[in-house]
Image (tube, rainbow, N blue to C red):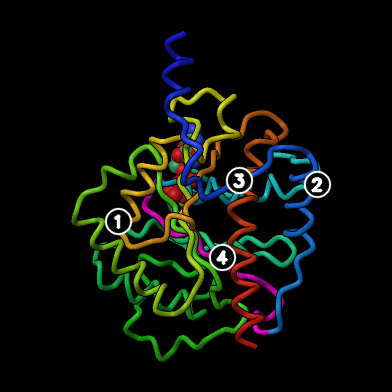
Amino acid sequence: MFDFLRFMFSFSKESSAHFPIFDDRSLETLRRYLCDYNPPEGCVNRINILLYGMVGAGKSAAINTFLSALDQHGTTTNCVPTGDDLKSLTPQLKAYRLNALQFWDPSGWNALDDADRGKKVLTMILEGRVPPGTDLQHFKPDSDNQYLVIPENVIHGVAFIFNTDTMDNISKELMEQFKDLQTIVAQKYIQRIMIGTKLDQLEIPKKYYHIIYNYKPLQNKFAKFSSSTGMDKNQMFIISNELKGVNIERTKCILALYALENMVRNIDKYFKVAQ
Ligand SMILES: Nc1nc2c(ncn2[C@@H]2O[C@H](COP(=O)(O)OP(=O)(O)O)[C@@H](O)[C@H]2O)c(=O)[nH]1
Ligand SMILES: [Mg+2]
């Protein structure tokens, strides 16, 4: 009873920015759009999406979620090493492609020893000057003349990945660092979204996931994040990367693809207007 009341009063119909629909048809529509997507000419036949976040935020796990959710049968994949897997700790920039979508998985931005170097490395990744396989720990952005732009590696969208549970407790210093990184992306007119991970760790019963964007504590987290970073609340999403069993659950698919579709549509619009 307490749980029921507690949750009932935690949901607000107002000010929700997102209205995903959690049925089979909606999932099929999202999948079709993303799997059959044909990028505009300016994109060199693919959309490059960089997942950018701190160590352990869930960048690699989010790519597994996207790839699983995009699979026609929702078959789970863990082709991207995550967590304590030693391979996940290698500082190489990796790219994973499915049809026209290519996801880029760099090391966590707080793992680089020096914030200035981090900014330069980010700039070069965005410009398509850091090929997949590059060891980011030893990469020297100052010798940048030797790294030419590779058009098919230019980044079109950045998904900033944060652990939803801890995103409102990040130190001021790290937040300042993040703001600088975010500004670099914004100044290049690259589409940005923020994806909060680990929804399943927020202790919200699963039966409320379909109204998660009406959940006031989440709206408050997004509002706080928006005021400290300047990012638009409407560009903030939540997902769960917890993959259990052979198939990814429909709700998790829809949450992940809903965020992805939003970014791809905005990239598409941007390129079509620019042409
Ligand atoms: N329960 C749960 N665990 C997650 C989620 N996202 C990531 N993780 C776990 O958090 C740890 C770090 O994730 P990882 O993707 O390796 O983080 P990365 O350093 O940003 O690539 C791993 O053990 C993941 O399995 C999530 O949404 N839910
Ligand atoms: Mg990783």
Q: Amino acid at mark 4?
A: Ile
Which labelled disc corresponds to residue 49? Answer: 4
Residue linked to disc 1: 227
Q: Amino acid at mark 1?
A: Ser
Circles 2 and 4 in contact, beta carbons < 8 Å: no
Q: Amino acid at mark 2?
A: Gln
Q: Amino acid at mark 3?
A: Phe
Circles 1 and 3 in contact, beta carbons < 8 Å: no
Distance between the alpha carbons at the discs numbered 1 and 3: 23 Å
What element does badge 2 sit on? loop
Visible residue check, residue 122? yes
Q: Earlier in the sequence, mark 4 or mark 1?
A: 4
Distance between the alpha carbons at the discs numbered 2 and 1: 39 Å
What element does badge 4 sit on? strand
Name the residue at 32% across, 72% down.
119
Q: Earlier in the sequence, mark 3 or mark 2?
A: 3
Distance between the alpha carbons at the discs numbered 2 and 4: 21 Å
- Tell me if the residue at label 1 has its CB under 8 Å from ligand 1: no
Expressed as whole percent of the image width and height from the top left, the position of residue 252 reads 62, 38
Q: Earlier in the sequence, mark 2 or mark 4?
A: 4
Region in magenta:
42-56
User: Could you tell whether 27 is left or right of 129 in the image?
Assistant: right
Residue furthest out toward the front: 14
Expressed as whole percent of the image width and height from the top left, the position of residue 172 reads 19, 53
What element does badge 1 sit on? helix
What element does badge 3 sit on? loop
